[in-house]
Image: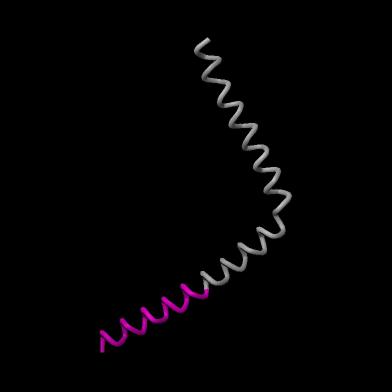
Amino acid sequence: MKRQTKVAPIFRVMIWAGLIVTSLYMMIPSVVAFSMRVLEKAVTDSFIFSRVYRDKDAVYEL
């Protein structure tokens, strides 16, 4: 009985994960577009930050 009570929640979690995954698959196009925008912004920000950081290092070196 104890084993069953331990296994049941795992199956429930698996079912919930399946539902979430299917809903995510339905929303994938918008999610991908949004994540690509966020990644692009993050990458550009990081490049700007690294450039500023390098400039600061150069200034400190001078």
Where residue 31 appears, x then y in whole percent?
A: 66, 58
- The residue depicted at 56 percent of the width and 25 percent of the height is 9
The answer to which quarter of the image holds residue 30 is bottom right
Q: Is residue 15 toward the left or the right of residue 56 in the image?
A: right
Where residue 32 appears, x then y in whole percent?
A: 66, 60
Q: Is 60 in front, or is 23?
A: 23
The quadrant of the rendering that contains the C terminus is bottom left
**59 relative to 34, above or below:** below
Identify the magenta region. 44-62
Looking at the rendered structure, the number of numbered marks drawn on it comes to 0
Where residue 60 appears, x then y in whole percent?
A: 26, 84
Asked if the stretch drawn in magenta spans residue 53, the answer is yes
Q: Is residue 49 toward the left or the right of residue 19 in the image?
A: left
* Residue with the most extreme bottom position: 62
Q: Main secondary structure of the magenta part?
A: helix
- The residue depicted at 67 percent of the width and 64 percent of the height is 33
Where residue 19 appears, x then y in whole percent?
A: 68, 38
The answer to which quarter of the image holds residue 8 is top right
Q: Is 41 in front, or is 23?
A: 23
- The residue depicted at 63 percent of the width and 63 percent of the height is 34
**38 relative to 21, above or below:** below
- The residue depicted at 65 percent of the width and 32 percent of the height is 15
Q: How is the image coloured?
A: one colour
**34 relative to 26, above or below:** below
Asked if the stretch drawn in magenta spans residue 36, the answer is no
* Residue with the most extreme top position: 1
Q: Is 50 in front, or is 7?
A: 7
